[in-house]
Amino acid sequence: MRDNDLRLDGNAAGGLLNEIFPFEMTAAEATCAGCAATSLIGELMLYQHGMGAVLRCADCDTALMRITHIRGSYRLDLSGMTYLRIASDIH
Amino acid sequence: MAQQLKWQLGTVVEIRQETPRAKSLILDLPDWTTHLAGQHVDVRLTAEDGYQAQRSYSIASPPEDRHLMLTVERIEGGEVSPYLTDGLRVGDRVELRGPVGGYFVWDAREGKHDGSPLFLAAGGSGVAPLMAMIRHRAHAGNKVPTRLLYSSRSYEEVIYREELERLSASDPTLRIIHTLTRRRPPDWAGYGRRVDRAMLADAAWPPAENPLAFTCGPTAFVEAVATHLEELGYEPGRIKTERFGPTGG
């Protein structure tokens, strides 16, 4: 199996993101710190692993969001994004 | 409106054998709010020792249905799908949360879509969320020109085959185009290969018609469809993708 076969769309992280944010997050817009592309969270590449997930830019592969859930805490590394816009009126 | 999804229990009210490897689970969910065609649910299984496994499954039923339909393909060695296809009986309960997703969705109601022709491309059980769109479109009486390009291994493995035939026979604005990649009936007149650029050039709407494309299936299938549609002139933002990984598990 090629590593690329493991990737999913950010769309599949909707349930996990909803554990943290009280909004529908797959339609939120994020700007990549690597290449400045703005895309919807649902369009990012998702790599899931035992403790969480990584969302990467579909254009340049920068990790926009790393999420882990360990010992009762969610830990978010958002250093790969410069901007996040969340619509508050959709659900 | 902010909303935190909660895990809830659904009761299996019917199990439908769709193909030799795929079953549809019809679930009754007392606490269900409505969904949009294309959305998914997260299904969680908990073992007696507390170990949990979780997978996302697209909703195949339209928002108009009272019950929720999930279509699950049995994956050999999968952690979740064999339990769902072989272990469940009518009356059993399944833990899930949803509906999830605001990106891979299509709403047939007046004013909720831009009237563009729809091009849907399904690989195997990736047809499920696209079927929700087709069923929803039929319920709403929506006549947006729609084509479904549907890749299956064989004729026997075409999920929802009869319903798709029935819907397209009574609706000239809906066209179903099959390709069978492994085995074909002797008199098969349709495509008999994996999706490629030439097939998409024939089957998909020309970019000049400003179509909206949704594609769902195994990662390699989805990436082939998206790449070829872009080469044919589709705007990347008009191609919505839903990869379900190598296995779907």
Image: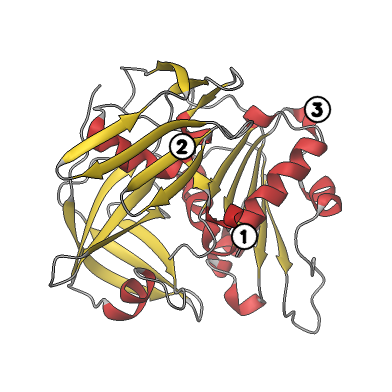
* x and y, in percent, of residue B134 in the image: 53, 48
Subunit under mark 3: B
The residue under label 2 is A55
| Circles 3, 2 touching at the beta carbon (< 8 Å) | no
Q: Nearer the viewer, residue A53 or B108?
A: A53
Secondary structure beneath dot 2 equals strand
Q: Is the residue B65 above or below the residue A14 in the image?
A: below
* x and y, in percent, of residue B198 in the image: 86, 52
Subunit under mark 2: A
* x and y, in percent, of residue B182 in the image: 72, 77
> What label does residue B208 carry, if any?
3
Instruction: Indicate the quadrant containing the C terminus of chain B: top left, top right, bottom left or bottom right.
Output: bottom left
Q: CA distance from mark 3 to mark 2?
A: 33 Å
> What label does residue B83 carry, if any?
none
Q: Residue at x 31, y 75 (%)?
A: B83
Q: Is the residue A51 above or below the residue A87 in the image?
A: below
Q: Quadrant of residue A36?
A: top right
Q: Residues within 10 Å of mark 2 (few under 14, many from 20)?
A: many
Q: Which amino acid type corresponds to the residue marked 2 in the rendered image?
A: Leu
Say if residue B172 shows up in the picture. Answer: no
Relative to B178, A13 lies left or right: left
